[in-house]
Image: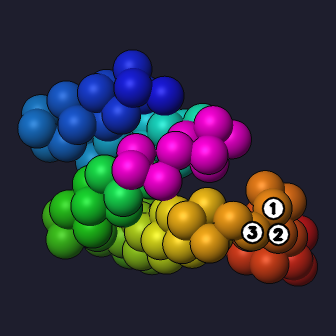
Amino acid sequence: MNDDLAEARGALERGNIGDAHRKAWDAAFAAENARDADALDEIRSLALQIEERAEGSTREEAHRLAVYCSACSDDIRAGIPHDSTMSRLFRRR
């Protein structure tokens, strides 16, 4: 997870928004699986930075990532079981 987060940050610094976005999602899934609320908060912050720089569908997906990270972090801190966040956010899939 930390590697994905570091790679996402590096990609964003280089202006590679697409790679930053993909790596941030990878980091988010790993952090959620590890139940690491602090990492999810960091990824949420990064997602908001990506959203500011991105356009079109990547911008929308970066916003979704920020919402996802926030929801997961809140659930972890509240002691809500792992599957609840995923099923609630991605119910239609």
Image disc number at residue 84: 2
Taking 85 as reference, is 26 left or right?
A: left
Taking 66 as reference, is 26 left or right?
A: right
Residue plotted at (47% across, 71% down): 70
- Mark 3 element type: loop
Residue 16 vertical position relative to residue 52 in the rendered view, above or below: above
Residue type highlighted by circle 1: Pro
For label 1, count other residues whose C-alpha is less than 10 Å away and answer few (under 14), some (14-19) or many (20+): few
Separation of marks 3 and 2 at Cα, in angstroms = 7 Å
- The magenta span reads 31-39
Nearer to us in this view, 79 or 3: 79
Nearer to us in this view, 76 or 22: 76
Residue type highlighted by circle 2: Ser
Image disc number at residue 81: 1
Separation of marks 2 and 1 at Cα, in angstroms = 6 Å
Q: Quadrant of the C terminus?
A: bottom right
